[in-house]
Structures are given as structure tokens and as C-alpha cells.
Amino acid sequence: MALIIGLTGGIASGKSTVARAFAALGAPWVDADDVAREVVAPGEPALAEIAKRFGARVLNDDGTLNRRELREIVFADEGERRWLESVTHPRIRERLIAHLERLVADGAPYVLLVTPLLFESGQVEMVDRALVIDVPEALQIERTAARDGVDADQARRIVAAQMPRAERLARADDVLDNGGSEAEMRRQVAELDRRYRQLVLTPHRE
């Protein structure tokens, strides 16, 4: 039976880069962020519900979701954020399960669920092991500022709004330190790949 590995980490920890390194070794992956965008695409029931609640201001001229506008609404009102989650999270979960089942059926020994909210969203219940990609907080802030074009103070606030690093690490089954070189990251990926393949063959060992 294939393993499902939940790959998570804080902002700018390099989740997608690590996932691509696993893919190079033959491990397929599903990105929860991609699925989250799918469920609010034009023609999807979730987008219709969102537009009905908040009006045309949350739609761009081409009918796609105005993410910036919606983000401002839900971050300013806890009740609206919870309503949005009630509309999107069940649909995301359903679609993630379908994607994962398809990859497992294709014969992969293990598959990755790449998600920033593995623990916060309850998606951890869908996986066999939780792999946390860890980097020092100072590096997170530096990478976030560079990637998103924000100043250090705003990047610091973004990092602070997420699950604390210590809590994320405490809940991990496996940790990959992504604060060093690409070669070191790939060495750790190769080691984890061997471990996961061995676990599929001898699951009683862990």
C-alpha cells in the first residue's frame, strides 16, 4: 500500500523546490494550493457562492476571483474567514483525496501532499507521515521580502501570523533542514526517499 506523505513548512521554506527534488526521484505530488485555486475557478460552485455573498467587488473583469479584495475582506473579519473556509475547505479536501487516490492507483510507492496548512486545516488526517521543511525564521523573512516584494517588517508579520516554528517541528514525523545548499537539500531528499520506500516494504519497522 502506498504511503501518503504530507509535505509542509512555513512561508518561503522551499516546499515546491523540495517537492520537485522528490519528483526527480519518481515521487509524484499534489499541491494543495493548486487545488485551492481550482475550486474557485470560473464555473465552479464555490466561486458562485463567494460572488453571491460579497458581490462583484470580489470578481475581476474576466470573471476570475479577485484574491486581493477577498483577502482584505476575510482578514478583517473572522466570521467571514470562517464562512469562506466552510465553502472552500470541504471541496478542496474532496478534490485532494481524488488526486491522491489517482496517483496511488498509478502505482507510486509513495506520494506527496504539498500543503502549507497541513496541521491547521486538518489535512494531516489524510496522510501517513508529516514531513516539515524547516528553515531559520530570519531566512524565511529574507526570502519572503525578496520573493513578494515587501519590506522586512511586513515579511516579519506574515511569518508571525503562521503556526510557530517550534509547534510545527513538534508535530513532524520527519524534518528536512532547507537552510543550506541545494546539494545538501537533495542529499536529505534522497535519504528520505530511501526511508519512505523501505517503509512501504516493511511498514512494521516504524
Image: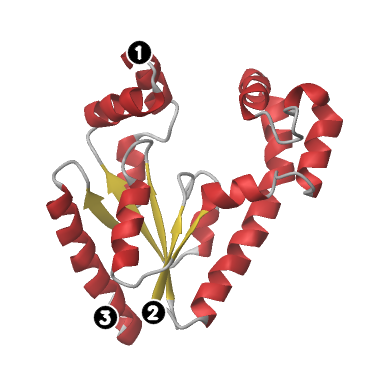
Q: Is residue 61 above or below residue 13?
A: above
Residue underneath mark 2 = 109
Coloring applied to the structure: secondary structure
Q: Amino acid at mark 2?
A: Pro
Query: Which mark is drawn over residue 153?
Result: 1
Left or right relative to 136: residue 153? right
Find out whether the residues at labels 2 and 3 contact each other: C-beta distance under 8 Å.
no
Query: Which mark is drawn over residue 107?
Result: none
Q: CA distance from mark 2 to mark 1?
A: 43 Å
Q: Amino acid at mark 3?
A: Gln
Q: Residue furthest front?
A: 62
Q: Residues within 10 Å of mark 2 (few under 14, many from 20)?
A: many
Q: Residue furthest right?
A: 52
Q: Position of residue 55 (x, y in %)?
A: 83, 25
Query: Which mark is drawn over residue 198?
Result: 3
Q: Position of residue 167 (x, y in %)?
A: 35, 41
Q: Is residue 5 above or below residue 91?
A: below
Left or right relative to 42: residue 78? left
Q: Amino acid at mark 1?
A: Asp
Q: Residue furthest bottom?
A: 201
